[in-house]
Image (tube, rainbow, N blue to C red):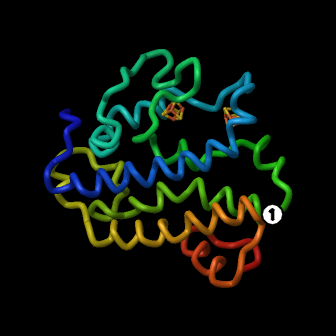
Amino acid sequence: MNPTPLPEIAVIVEQYRSFELRVGRLMQEICVPFCKGCRTPCCRVGICREAQESPFLQAVHGAIQGFDVRHGYLGCNGCKLTTGRPPVCHAFVCNLIVSSQPSDWHRYAIDCLGNLVGFVGKKACNGRHLVEALTDDDLRKVNIRQFGRQLEIAETALPILEAFLNHGELDDHAISVLALIRKCPSS
Ligand code: SF4
Ligand code: SF4
């Protein structure tokens, strides 16, 4: 499969990549203190394989990093993919990290943050997630308007989460935006 994006989706590939990078940076700030000393990393080759096989994720990461049959994309310093990771890699946060959060709202915020990347591509390809597109023909059916609407919501949610995780405040408007990503704990 050619990792060069189809011209029809080149713009959304770039938007997705840029958004994933921003989410990844914030998630890293939260997770690195735990992950850097982790003796039982949660990465699995079977999950990495999705990034290797999905035409959309290939277009995002550009197939620059080699896939290792034993370790997938896991290197000595963690994941070698800065973008184009399967959405579950962003969404999964282990119990050690979750239980170290100071409140239910912090746990909720991390859950929302982890789901932002997946949210952007939800049902955007003929009713399936973007990363589930199997062929270039599938990718030509991407609903670009739906992708755009979801990206706009996720782009609104990201600074809200960043502010909350840095300063600890969520007003009603912030909660109503986040509720579009994940059901909030008070509802
Ligand atoms: S998320 Fe948890 S289990 Fe996974 S590498 Fe980090 S500390 Fe380890
Ligand atoms: S974070 Fe990277 S190394 Fe870990 S499972 Fe996902 S793609 Fe593989």
Q: Is residue 4 left or right of residue 24?
A: left
**Residue at the location (14% across, 51% down)?**
7
At x 47%, y 62%, the residue is: 119
| Quarter-of-image position of residue 146 | bottom left
Q: Residues within 10 Å of mark 1 (few under 14, many from 20)?
A: some
Q: Quadrant of the C terminus?
A: bottom right
Number of callouts: 1
Q: Does mark 1's beta carbon lie closer than 8 Å to ligand 1? A: no
Q: Which residue is mark 1?
A: 104
Q: Position of residue 31 (x, y in %)?
A: 69, 41
Horizontal arrangement in the rendering, residue 86 relative to residue 179 (left or right)? left
SS label for mark 1: helix
Asked if 102 appears above or below 86 in the picture, the reply is below
Q: Nearer the viewer, residue 13 or 167?
A: 167
From the image, which quarter does the N terminus lie in? top left
Tell me where residue 85 sits by quadrant.
top left
Q: Position of residue 152 (x, y in %)?
A: 42, 71
- For residue 104, above or below residue 50: below
Residue name at image x 47 percent, y 72 percent: 153
Residue 135: image location, x then y, percent: 20, 45
Residue 90 x, y percent position in the rendering: 55, 46
Image side of residue 16 versus residue 107, left or right: left
Q: Amino acid at mark 1?
A: Asp
In this rendering, is residue 169 above or below 82?
below
Residue at (46, 37) in percent of width and height = 82
Quadrant assignment, res 126: bottom left
Which residue occupies the extreme bottom position in the image?
A: 172
